[in-house]
Image (cartoon, rainbow, N blue to C red):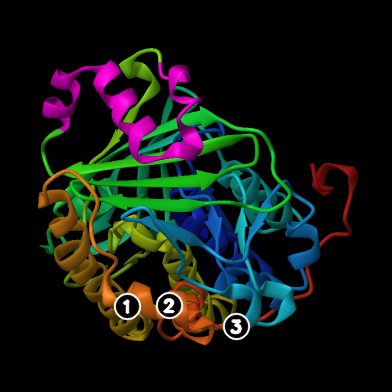
Amino acid sequence: MGDLDLCIVGGGPAGMMAGLLFARAGVRTTVLEKHADFLRDFRGDTVHPSTLRLFSELNLLDRLLERPHDKLRRPAALIGGERVEIGDFFSAFDPRWNFVAMMPQWEFLDFIADEGRRYPGFELRMNAVVRDLLVDKERVIGVSLQHEGVLEQLHAKLVIAADGRESLLRKAARLPVRDLGAPMDVFWFRLPKPRTPENTSTGVVTGGRVLALLDRGDYWQCAYLFAKGEAEVVRARGLVALRDEVARIAPPVAEAVAALRNWDDLKLLTVRLDRLDRWHRPGLLVIGDAAHAMSPIGGIGINVAIQDAVAAANLLASAMARGEDVDGLLPKVEARRRLPVRLTQAFQAEAQKRIIGRVLAAREGAIRLPLPMRLLRRYAWLRRIPAWFLGFGFRAEHISSPDAGLSRPYSDESAPK
């Protein structure tokens, strides 16, 4: 059955990684991405040690790191005016991946696309807007889409939905969603900065406000957190008030806030924390944010999504390459990933409730440095614990999907840009 072995909907980290791994195993794979390119601001740009290790296992890490990136080894926070190092990747891990690679997501996805094109069974179709699932007797058999203005149907033995937190396909499949709640939303914006020898990403926490400053080399990617649903309250106070507040609580960007000239310079992220109660139905598997939307806390979302893709390939690719029906294996993918996702989301939910929510509800002004932060500041070895959680999380995957040996030699087209 099916014109294709595998159709993957969504060209984000989960979809692209799955496309690469299944094509590497000899599975005829098409990835459908609705946009014309990967060039979009304010997407997750933190490639964590768990993901770097996966690319090392694929013998692709050196090539990946030829793409533009900075290395974050010791993340810090400014809490109540006191600076605390909250993690130490440098001391905790293998030197090949003892950092977070701060790499623009378009560079990361473009790299995977180039590597995928080395396999004859890999196809990436941009500007491919999926409209609905194709279903025959309760089994998903493909998707309907509009590509370059043409309506068409694409049949496949398996569809993987990796189309993000606003997933059309999980709605079309009528899969039940559990909302775990989130006490905050975020305004993202960019501010200019000079390049520094070390990456200086910092979180700023003070009474009533949380601000993340992610060092992207020549600019700050800033996340301004506020209580859920109060975007219009923030806007009503005015842009001048917002600039003044950011300058007051975050001295590193005080001189740069003038770059915010109008509200078009800010992008609202409505934070969600949810997951599907079931990730599959016959002919369909849901992974990544489509299966479990993560909070931006820790920047771990794209890395958890990539773990899903690896687990799916590990469990399904061999059978698919042999032409076998894998419907019976789909529950095993969910079973493999269910516990790590739930543990990660439980941590995020507690952090949102006990830390972020309380800080946002507090009166404006300095706050006392919490005991865990005081311990991290005093005992350097403790910083390996948050580094471990952020770096590898729960049950990090290894590559065990097969390499069918079909890759083409590197060419000018697949050379790093």
Verify CB contact (< 8 Å) between mark 2 and mark 1: yes
Few, some or many residues within 10 Å of mark 1 (<14, 14–19, 20+): few
In percent of the image, x 34 and y 40: which residue is there?
A: 249
User: Which residues are drawn in magenta?
Assistant: 231-260
Q: Amino acid at mark 2?
A: Leu
Instruction: Assign the magenta stretch its main secondary structure.
Output: helix
Q: Report how far apart the C-alphas of labels 2 and 1 lie in the structure.
A: 6 Å
Identify the mark at residue 372; answer none if there is no mark: 1
The residue wearing badge 2 is 376
In the rendering, at what x and y percent does residue 321 appear? 59, 76
Instruction: Decide: is 308 above or below 230.
Output: below
Few, some or many residues within 10 Å of mark 2 (<14, 14–19, 20+): some
Q: Amino acid at mark 1?
A: Pro
The total of numbered circles placed on residues is: 3
Camera-side residue: 341 or 323? 341
In percent of the image, x 73 and y 75: which residue is there?
A: 96
The residue wearing badge 3 is 92
- Mark 1 lies on a secondary structure that is helix
Camera-side residue: 153 or 265? 265
Q: Report the mark closest to the observer, 1 or 3.
A: 1
Camera-side residue: 385 or 3? 385
